Image (spheres, rainbow, N blue to C red):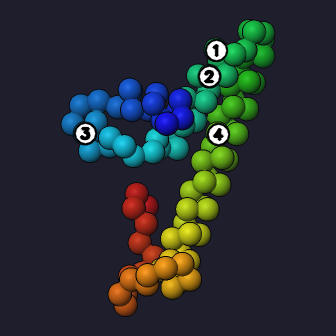
């Protein structure tokens, strides 16, 4: 499991911890983790804010790309292009949207 996924699971607590166990980190968790990693790796305090901002933007873009690719795969399956076709009326529902 990637470090960011382990870190996200460590941060999750309370009632949601069991429900969320094994799920990928949210976009917010991934961006926050990436900003924290940038903070640890930055040696120049004058550049810290810019480094953290850049890391957060890059992580957000990577997450959005990952989500879009996943949605495209799901669309292909729902359209019958990638395996078993679900029953009529399956629609385009997405969890968390």
Whether tag 2 and tag 1 are in contact, CB under 8 A, the answer is yes
Q: Which residue is mark 3?
A: 18
In whole angstroms, how far apart are the C-alphas of marks 4 and 2?
A: 11 Å
Reading the chain from its start, which is encountered first: label 1 or label 4?
1
In which quarter of the view is residue 44 placed? top right
Element under disc 3: helix
Whether tag 1 and tag 3 are in contact, CB under 8 A, the answer is no
In which quarter of the view is residue 19 placed? top left
Whether tag 2 and tag 3 are in contact, CB under 8 A, the answer is no
Reading the chain from its start, which is encountered first: label 4 or label 3?
3
On screen, residue 45 versus residue 34, left or right, reads right
Residue drawn at x 32%, y 43% as measured from the top left: 20
In whole angstroms, how far apart are the C-alphas of marks 1 and 4?
A: 16 Å
Q: Which residue is mark 2?
A: 37
Q: Nearer the viewer, residue 86 or 17?
A: 86
Residue drawn at x 39%, y 27% as measured from the top left: 11
Q: Which residue is mark 4?
A: 59
In whole angstroms, how far apart are the C-alphas of marks 1 and 3?
A: 29 Å
In whole angstroms, how far apart are the C-alphas of marks 4 and 3?
A: 25 Å
Q: Which residue is mark 1?
A: 40
């Amino acid at each position: 499991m990637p470090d960011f996924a382990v870190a996200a699971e460590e941060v999750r607590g309370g009632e949601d911890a069991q429900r969320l166990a094994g799920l990928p980190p949210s976009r917010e968790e991934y961006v926050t983790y990436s900003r924290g990693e940038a903070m640890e790796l930055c040696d120049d305090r004058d550049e810290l804010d810019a480094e953290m901002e850049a890391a957060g933007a890059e992580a957000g873009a990577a997450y959005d790309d990952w989500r879009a690719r996943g949605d495209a795969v799901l669309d292909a399956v729902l359209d019958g292009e990638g395996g078993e076709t679900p029953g009529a009326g399956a629609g385009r529902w997405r969890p968390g949207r």
